[in-house]
């Protein structure tokens, strides 16, 4: 009896990849603040009052690993860290602006109902 060997491909859905990259409660607010010029973790904590520092650091680390942001550490006392958007992060911000516009349409439609 002959057995057939099945070849399975790891298919990656681009939409799923995109959603997984920005999933996380604080990633979009962090990106939004970076787009407005904020760069330091303390600024993010002030701008997102309810986020825990540990959670913020985890979200920043994940975003850095995905290539959305770049971390720069300065060798000074006290230690200073700044984050900036990468080109990939800038592209995502443009998408978020479009999503924001779509959200306005949703709000307007709900008000009509």
Image (cartoon, rainbow, N blue to C red):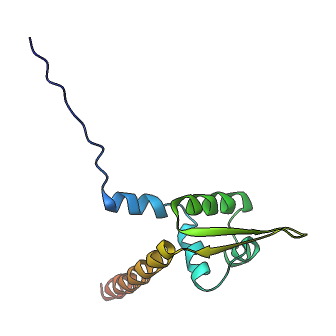
Name the residue rendered at 67%, 81% in the picture.
Answer: 38
Residue 67 position, x and y percent, is 52, 64
Q: Is residue 69 left or right of residue 52?
A: left
Image quarter where the N terminus lies is top left
Residue 23 location, x and y as percent? 48, 61
**Camera-side residue: 104 or 81?**
81
Q: Is residue 73 above or below residue 11?
A: below
Horizontal and vertical percent position of residue 86: 54, 74
Residue at position x 31%, y 52% in the image: 12
Residue positioned 58% across, 66% down in the render: 26
Give the number of callouts: 0
Residue at the outermost right position: 77
Q: Is residue 41 left or right of residue 89?
A: right
Q: Quadrant of the C terminus?
A: bottom left
* Quadrant of residue 95 within the rendered picture: bottom left
Q: Is residue 12 above or below residue 29?
A: above
The residue sitting at the front extreme is 75
Who is closer to the viewer here, 87 or 94? 87
Looking at the image, the residue that sits furthest to the left is 1
Residue 20 higher or lower than 72, as above or below: above
The quarter holding residue 99 reads bottom left
Q: Is residue 72 left or right of residue 84?
A: right
**Is residue 106 found left or right of 27 in the rendered image?**
left
Where is residue 55? Give x, y as percent.
67, 58
Residue at the image position 56 percent from the left and 75 percent from the top:
31
Return the residue nearer the eye: 48 or 8.
Answer: 8
């Amino acid at each position: 009896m002959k057995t057939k060997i099945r070849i399975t491909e790891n298919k990656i859905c681009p939409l799923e990849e995109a959603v997984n990259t920005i999933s996380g409660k604080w990633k979009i607010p962090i990106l939004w603040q970076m787009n407005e010029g904020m760069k330091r973790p303390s600024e993010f904590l002030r701008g997102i009052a309810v986020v825990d520092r540990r959670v913020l650091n985890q979200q920043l680390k994940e975003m850095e690993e995905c290539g959305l942001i770049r971390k720069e550490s300065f060798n000074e006392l006290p230690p200073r860290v700044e984050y900036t958007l990468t080109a990939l992060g800038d592209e995502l911000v443009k998408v978020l602006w479009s999503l924001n516009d779509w959200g306005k349409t949703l709000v307007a439609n709900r008000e009509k109902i």
